[in-house]
Image (cartoon, rainbow, N blue to C red):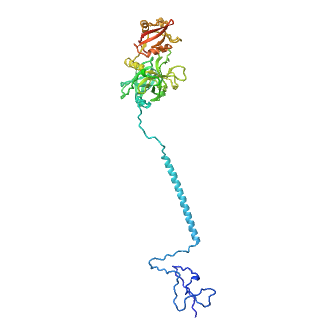
């Protein structure tokens, strides 16, 4: 009886790849197929034990290590699904990373913008050379004050500066004229009440005094005789009530004869000044402030300006326009003498020549009137002019060799001196020129 074909089913934990017929072993017998002989067996001979196939090693769980088997049974569909998952995961990661990166970039830009720092110079020493404008201002400002004045129905602002440790302050007469209340404010902001000591309208100067103020810093007084055209100057004041304003310029001219005031109409308040001219900006409120030289010494008291809307010289009482670079200051030598007299007696003296001038004369020079007021003689008997030989009708053309062109200029030249000073006058009389020597007399001011 022929043997039955028996197929050995391999264990499920190992795979047996099919081997091609060409690679069959010598004991495998003829290949199964349609051409096989009928009844031929394909398995082992009858009566013999089946032999294990030689397709691969048997898995032995008790071996030293498991057998690693390559899994080649994955289908393309599974691989496609896993690929799509990987692509989606990568895309999501990229989007997440992009979003986080963009947010971090915006945050970094905002933080960077809040910490933006532009190039800047380092902090330097605030010290300045003493002769510089800043150095002069630093020296002088503690001694400059702003005056707020209230009168009958009016108020105003001016400037002044400290003269001595006793609290005397020099300013312009037109700042405190008719004042009922005077308040002085220092550069530190401290304000105190001041009292009027004395004033003189002819020189446009006044002195006020403060009490109980410690640490006063008087300004040093220079000498106006040393001033030259072109010298640098600094002005300090309160233009339009802007306290502690500092401006700078030069001396534009010296010996400028100017008159200011005349608001009363009778000439009693006219001031005559042989002024220093400066282009340092001076505006309403600068009146009474110091004009300083390069060593922070007072060389003048700012008093008048010429405005663009006026045809002549004038002061801040009449002109409220801005500076056009034509400012005038009372020379400090004149201011010093008048201040000393005001502090001592409350009044100032004026140098006089003892003659009455014809202020209507339009020719060149200052003409002495033929007759005085009220029928009195034009030349005061035994006065300075009479002793010098001046006669009614004489035309005075020079004072100490300097030309005078009118009565105002003669008064200005005389008032630039002290009582008792000698003068040389040049006069025209009957078409002839005469030189006269004169010693100035004294009269009480207003």
Instruction: Please state the horizontal and vertical placement of residue 387, each as a whole percent of the image.
Output: 42, 7
Instruction: Please state the horizontal and vertical placement of residue 230, each as a whole percent of the image.
Output: 47, 25
**In percent of the image, x 41 and y 18: which residue is there?**
338
Q: Is residue 368 visible?
A: no
Q: Quadrant of residue 167?
A: top left
Residue 148 left/right relative to 214: right
> In the image, is residue 42 above or below residue 401?
below
Query: Considering depth in this image, is 102 or 68 the residue closer to the camera?
Result: 68
Query: Considering depth in this image, is 86 or 175 the residue closer to the camera?
Result: 86
Q: Is residue 294 visible?
A: yes
Residue 345 left/right relative to 278: left
Extreme residue in the bottom direction: 1
Instruction: Please state the horizontal and vertical placement of residue 80, each as a whole percent of the image.
Output: 58, 68
Instruction: Please state the horizontal and vertical placement of residue 294, each as a whole percent of the image.
Output: 43, 27
Give the mark count.
0
Quadrant, the C terminus: top left
Quadrant, the N terminus: bottom right
Query: Considering depth in this image, is 280 or 310 the residue closer to the camera?
Result: 280
Extreme residue in the right direction: 34
């Amino acid at each position: 009886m022929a043997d039955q074909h028996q197929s050995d089913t391999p264990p499920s934990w190992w795979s047996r790849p099919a081997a091609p017929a060409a690679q069959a072993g010598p004991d495998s017998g003829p290949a199964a197929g349609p051409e096989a002989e009928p009844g031929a067996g394909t398995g082992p001979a009858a009566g013999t034990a089946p032999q294990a196939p030689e397709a691969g090693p048997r898995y032995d769980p008790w071996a030293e290590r498991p057998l690693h088997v390559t899994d080649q049974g994955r289908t393309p569909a599974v691989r496609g699904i896993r690929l799509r998952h990987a692509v989606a995961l990568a895309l999501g990661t990229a989007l997440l990373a992009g979003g986080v990166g963009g947010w971090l970039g915006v945050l970094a830009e905002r933080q960077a913008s809040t910490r933006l720092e532009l190039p800047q110079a380092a902090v330097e020493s605030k010290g300045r050379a003493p002769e510089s404008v800043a150095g002069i201002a630093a020296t002088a400002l503690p001694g400059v004050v702003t005056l707020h004045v209230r009168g009958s129905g009016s108020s105003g602002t001016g400037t002044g500066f400290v003269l001595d440790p006793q609290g005397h302050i020099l300013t312009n007469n037109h700042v405190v004229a008719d004042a009922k209340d005077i308040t002085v404010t220092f550069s530190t902001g401290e304000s105190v009440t001041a009292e009027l000591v004395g004033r003189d309208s002819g020189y446009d100067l006044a002195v006020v005094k403060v009490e109980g103020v410690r640490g006063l810093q008087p300004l040093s007084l220079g000498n106006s005789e040393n001033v030259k055209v072109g010298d640098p100057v600094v002005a300090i004041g309160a233009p339009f009530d802007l306290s502690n304003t500092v401006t700078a310029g030069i001396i534009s001219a010296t010996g400028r004869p100017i008159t200011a005031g005349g608001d009363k109409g009778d000439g009693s308040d006219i001031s005559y000044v042989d002024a220093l001219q400066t282009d340092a900006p001076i505006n309403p409120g600068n009146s009474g402030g110091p004009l300083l030289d390069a060593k922070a010494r007072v060389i003048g008291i700012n008093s008048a300006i010429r405005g663009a809307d006026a045809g002549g010289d004038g002061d801040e009482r009449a002109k409220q326009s801005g500076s056009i670079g034509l400012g005038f200051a009372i020379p400090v030598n004149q201011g010093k003498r008048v201040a000393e007299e005001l502090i001592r007696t409350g009044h100032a003296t004026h140098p006089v020549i003892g003659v009455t001038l014809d202020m209507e004369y339009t020719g060149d020079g200052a003409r002495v009137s033929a007759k005085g007021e009220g029928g009195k003689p034009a030349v005061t008997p035994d006065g300075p002019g009479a002793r010098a030989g001046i006669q009614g009708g004489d035309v005075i053309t020079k004072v100490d060799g300097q030309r005078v062109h009118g009565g105002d200029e003669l008064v200005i030249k005389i008032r630039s001196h002290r009582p008792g000073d000698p003068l040389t006058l040049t006069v025209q009389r009957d078409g002839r020129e005469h030189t006269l020597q004169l010693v100035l007399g004294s009269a009480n001011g207003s």
